[in-house]
Amino acid sequence: MTSISAQRLFELKKLTARIFASPIPLTQTKNSRNGSRILLKKPSSISIGSHYPSKEYYEATKVQRLIAPLKGTRYEPVDFDESIRLLKIEEKKKRGKGAPKKKEEDVKDIKKKK
C-alpha cells in the first residue's frame, strides 16, 4: 500500500468541497492560519488582561451560571460528588468509623467561652 502525499489529499478535499458546494474547513487548508495559537495564549499585557475576569472569580461564578436558569423551576441541580461523600460518611458512622463524639465537659467549656 502506498502512502498518499499531503498535497494530493488537499487537492481531493478541495475537489470534494467544490462538488458538494461546501467550504473547506480552515483547519484542513494547507498552511492554515486561523489564529487558534494566538487565541489560546494568555493575554500578554496588563491592560488587555484586565478585561478578563480572574481565574478565581471565573471558577466561582461558573457554578452560579449553571444554576441560574434553574431558579424558579421545580428542578434543582444535584451535586453528585457531595451526595456520594455524605453517603460514605453515613456508612462509616453506621460501622462506628465516624469522628469521635465530644465529651460533654468540652462542649460546656466551648459554650462558656462564647
Image: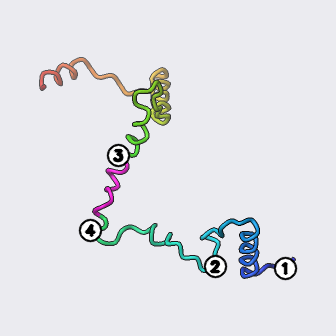
Residues under numbered marks 1 and 4 in contact, where contact means CB atoms less than 8 Å apart: no
Q: On the image, numbered disc 3 is attached to which residue?
A: 60
Q: Could you tell which of marks 1 and 3 lies nearer the N-terminus?
A: 1
Would residue 10 be counted in the magenta stretch?
A: no
- First in sequence: mark 1 vs mark 4: 1
Q: CA distance from mark 3 to mark 4?
A: 23 Å
| Place of residue 49 in the rendered image (x, y in percent of width and height, measured from the top left) | 31, 65
Q: Nearer the viewer, mark 3 or mark 2?
A: 2
Q: Earlier in the sequence, mark 3 or mark 4?
A: 4
Amino acid at pointer 3:
Ala
Q: Which residues are magenta?
A: 50-60
Q: CA distance from mark 1 to mark 4?
A: 53 Å
Q: Residue at x 16, y 22 (%)?
A: 109
> Are the residues tagged 3 and 2 within 8 Å (C-beta)?
no
Frontmost of labels 3 and 4 is 4
The residues tagged by marks 4 and 2 sit, at their Cα atoms, a distance apart of 35 Å
Q: Are marks 4 and 2 in contact (CB under 8 Å)?
A: no
**Residue sitting nearer the eye, 83 or 66:** 66
Disc on res. 30:
2
Residue marked by disc 1: 2
